[in-house]
Amino acid sequence: MYKDNSLLPREAVRLAALGILAGGPLTYAELAAAVRNFTSRVVGPSLDLMGTSIELLRFEGLISTEGPQTVNVSESVLKLTVAGSLELNSLLCASVRPPVNDVAKLILALKFKFFHLLKETDQCDQIEMMIEACEGEIARLDDLRSHDRKDPGLLMDWLDHEIGQVSDRLKWLRKLKKASDGGKRF
């Protein structure tokens, strides 16, 4: 993790693998394909997201094989361990780093994909943290806009577009918070 407790790109892949296994045991090949398919659909091919090995997760005791190990490793059935569940919760509770780039979008998508695995208080904390990140991002973009107001190019149009996207995300998160405050469990 970064010093601000936000996830490194490789930890996004770790979050994906552990979260997917939280849904139930899968073969090595199924898990690898599920992680690759989800991450590449959100951010496209990325060198930043390569390198996290499923074997490393097993070595760290976060996942284990179910039953006897097969000769063909890709057919080994993997399951989440107790340590893996704790690590998954830790990754899901990590902060989100503004601005929202491709990796941050992947992390947000993963957080929402596995949101139901968090305790209610952690869900509320995550929504609050995401709202604060959006507010900070809007403030940063507004500051840039105010300093470069006379720019003859298309910067102002682009900034308006970016501010609009972040504002829409903020509106959605505030609705989510209101539902959460009203007792809705996700």
Image (cartoon, grey):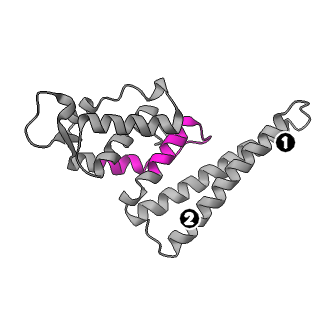
Q: Does residue 68 sit above or below 125 in this rendering? A: above
The kind of secondary structure the magenta stretch mainly shows is helix
The N terminus sits in image quarter: top left
Q: Contact, CB < 8 Å: mark 2 with mark 1?
A: no
| Residue toward you, 10 or 109 | 109
Q: Amino acid at mark 2?
A: Leu
Q: Residue furthest bottom?
A: 182
The C terminus sits in image quarter: bottom left
What residue is drawn where x is 78% and y is 38%?
158
Which residue range is magenta in the image? Answer: 86-111
What residue is drawn where x is 57% and y is 70%?
178
Q: Amino acid at mark 1?
A: Ser
State the image coordinates of residue 48 (x, y, percent, origin top left): 47, 26
Other-residue count near label 1 (Cα within 10 Å), few / some / many at <14 / 14–19 / ≥20: few
State the image coordinates of residue 95 (x, y, percent, origin top left): 49, 47
State the image coordinates of residue 56 (x, y, percent, origin top left): 26, 30
Instruction: Judge left or right: residue 15 versus residue 139.
Output: left
Residue 95 visible at all = no
Quarter of the image where one finds residue 53? top left
Q: CA distance from mark 2 to mark 1?
A: 30 Å
Instruction: Judge left or right: residue 98 versus residue 126.
Output: right
What residue is drawn where x is 25% and y is 51%?
24
Which residue is label 1 attached to?
146
The numbered dot on residue 176 is 2
Q: Does residue 29 sit above or below 178 in this rendering? A: above
Q: Residue furthest left?
A: 68
Please check the rendered image and state whether residue 18 is part of the magenta-colored stretch, yes or no: no
Helix, strand or loop under label 2: helix
